[in-house]
Amino acid sequence: MWPIKNMPDNPCNFICMTLAISQKLQTKLLVGYCNAILFQKSIREEMKQLTAQSEKIKVELREYYQEQLEVVVRDKLREFQEQLDAAETSLHKELEQREHALTEVASQQVKQISEK
């Protein structure tokens, strides 16, 4: 009667069988869909956590490198101040030496003038 193999003789049985198969497929599709939704939610949650973690790491790195920069700047400033202090000391010594030399020259000239 039916041209399809393993087909029940009664059309009602065929309809019931087809309906049962359809319901099983529909259930499998629904379960698959629900699993996909749950997976999507878990992926979104993981993305939120990873984004927050990434932001936290960015802030920590920014603070770390800012601190390192401040240390370098502080060291360079101290080094520059030491160079300025050394230059100032050197200039004072040179000034004292010139003043002493001028005093000597002036003293000798006064002495020469008073001897004449």
Image (spheres, rainbow, N blue to C red):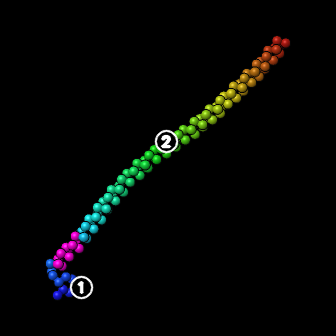
Q: Is residue 89 left or right of residue 1?
A: right
Percent x, y of residue 20: 21, 72
Residue position marked by numbered label 2 in the rendering: 63
Q: Between residues 22 and 93, which one lies in front from this camera angle? A: 22
Q: Is residue 115 left or right of residue 67?
A: right
Percent x, y of residue 115: 85, 12
Most distant residue in the right direction: 115
Residue 97 position (above or below residue 37): above
Q: Between residues 85 and 20, which one lies in front from this camera angle? A: 20
Residue range in magenta is: 13-23
Percent x, y of residue 64: 51, 42
Mark 2 nearby-residue class (10 Å; few <14, some 14–19, many ≥20)? few
Q: Is residue 17 left or right of residue 97?
A: left
Mark in front: 2 vs 1:
1
* Magenta stretch encompasses residue 1: no
Q: What is the C-alpha distance between the residues marked 2 and 1?
A: 75 Å
Callout 2–callout 1 Cβ contact below 8 Å: no
Q: Which mark is residue 5?
A: 1
Q: Quadrant of residue 3?
A: bottom left
Characterize the magenta stretch by its predominant secondary structure.
Answer: helix
Percent x, y of residue 14: 18, 79
Residue 4 position (above or below residue 100): below
Residue at (49% x, 42% y) in the render: 63
User: In the rendered structure, which amino acid carries the disc numbered 2?
Assistant: Glu
What secondary structure is found at the residue carrying circle 1? Answer: loop
Q: Is residue 56 left or right of residue 105?
A: left
Residue at (17% x, 77% y) in the render: 15
